[in-house]
Image: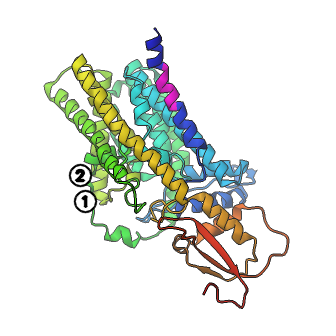
Amino acid sequence: MAAQSFHRFTPLLLLMCFVLCTSFLFPGDVSFENDEPTLLQRAGDANHTPCEILGISLSFTPARMGLTGTRGVSYGPLPIWFYQLILGATHDPIVMVRIHALLFSGVTAIALFWLTRSMRLSPWFAALSIFSPWLWQFDRMLWDNTFCIPLAAVAVAGYADFLATRRRWSVILAAISLAAMTLVHLMSVALVGGMVLHFMVFERRSLVRCRWSFIVIGILWACVFIPYLKAMSEVHQPPTAAAIEAASSGWWHPLVGGQHLTAFGWLAGSVSHLPAIVRICESLSLMANLAVWFGMGLILYRICKRVALTPMDHCALMCVFVVACQGVLDGFERIDLMPHYFNATWIAYVLLAWYGVDAVRQRSRRWAMGIYVFAAAYLAPVLIVLIAGIYFIHVNGGTRAVDYGTVLREQMQAAQRISEFSPDCPVDMTYPQWSLFPWAPRDLIALFPPQTSPRPLRRLVVRYRDAYRDDARIAVDDYPMWSNGPQ
């Protein structure tokens, strides 16, 4: 009895520990570069712009669309609405990170555990899957694309529960989550397409049973999506040079879509002198893709054998549809192989890995022991990379690579230092991240309380502190106006 209690509650404790660590362990150590300050700035502007809707005067304006991507297409307004709500409660970016991380990691953990319960899988699958360094990073980022992670988890968990129990509210929750994803990022098309395709092929009768709920969801969705489409048609921006020159062939990307189950590439390109063991562990974590590939092959084999499909089989088949839609989307759009492009479909790869591993585990006790060894061999490298990454990012104040950059905490301190001087101060910007994204310090300073007292006029130099090779911290030096700065 004690062993059963341990088996049942220990994964829950691990999930809770991860949620708390994500939310409250070094919340200032998040990436804050290009889109993040822009999202907060647009949310703040919308909160200070009055409007009138259906004859009702409001002191704010709900955003009609989000940021514009590299291909000239604007994303949905849902993330900006979220940040509008947060700005109504606090202007402290560190507090925003805590709220963001607590909600996103908490919802994701609950959805993963719900998914194991619906599919009658071991809760340890949920505990092992959530320790991904990519989830740790994205759950904390004040970005738009990251909204797809918890929404995708809830959508798949709700649909899986519906397949197992036929409860109507589960598929309605899944439909709401999918509708919300279309108001976040266009990469959600792969998950929406795969799930809708499975529903239309295998669950057409349920469409009649839930028709009124779907009609209400569709009407509410159209009330938001149509203004979003109209706003997109009014803004014409060409793709960036990087998108035009992209020569990527995305057709094969789904084969490595288990990125969020690995730690590969998380630190290797950002920290120059990582210990060899960390680099080895990044490569070892790629074994998670073996489980994903086995899961794909197993469900296709069962389809070819024409065996009776269980709810778990249907979930795996639905995930294969999602993977196929991901390949079509990436192929036609020639999308680069970037980790954040899997934020909308990551849960499909997680479920495929669970499906394959559980099939082997149930075969016999001897096979189950091999699975435990495989799980330990997978989890150890992932945890080593995650812990090493948290340490290096905290000690170095971030990374010098543009894919992560100097952390929010350091940028806030530097922006606070600049705000102590007159806005007319000449600034010698030798810090490359703010040279590349000059709106970041401006938008950060706008979050601080306005200064009313006179401020000195000095010549400012913003640079890396350069205490050692990977030091990403910022130094703000001030000199007399007649000085040329450091000699």
**Residue at numbered disc 1:** 249
The answer to whether residue 47 shows anywhere in this view is yes
Quarter of the figure with residue 365: top left
Disc 1 vs disc 2: Cβ atoms closer than 8 Å?
yes
Q: Secondary structure at mark 2?
A: helix
Q: Secondary structure at mark 1?
A: loop
Q: Is residue 171 visible?
A: no
Q: Left or right of 250: which side holds 143?
A: right
Q: Nearer the viewer, residue 238 or 265?
A: 265
In the rendered structure, which amino acid carries the disc numbered 2?
Trp
Nearer-the-camera pick, 201 or 283: 283
Locate residue 70, reporting x and y percent.
42, 65
Residue 252 numbered tag? 2
Q: Quadrant of residue 3?
A: top left
The span picked out in magenta is: 9-15
Apparent side of residue 367 relative to residue 101 in the rendered image (left or right):
left
Extreme residue in the top direction: 1
Q: What secondary structure is the magenta-colored segment mainly?
A: helix
The quadrant in which residue 260 appears is top left
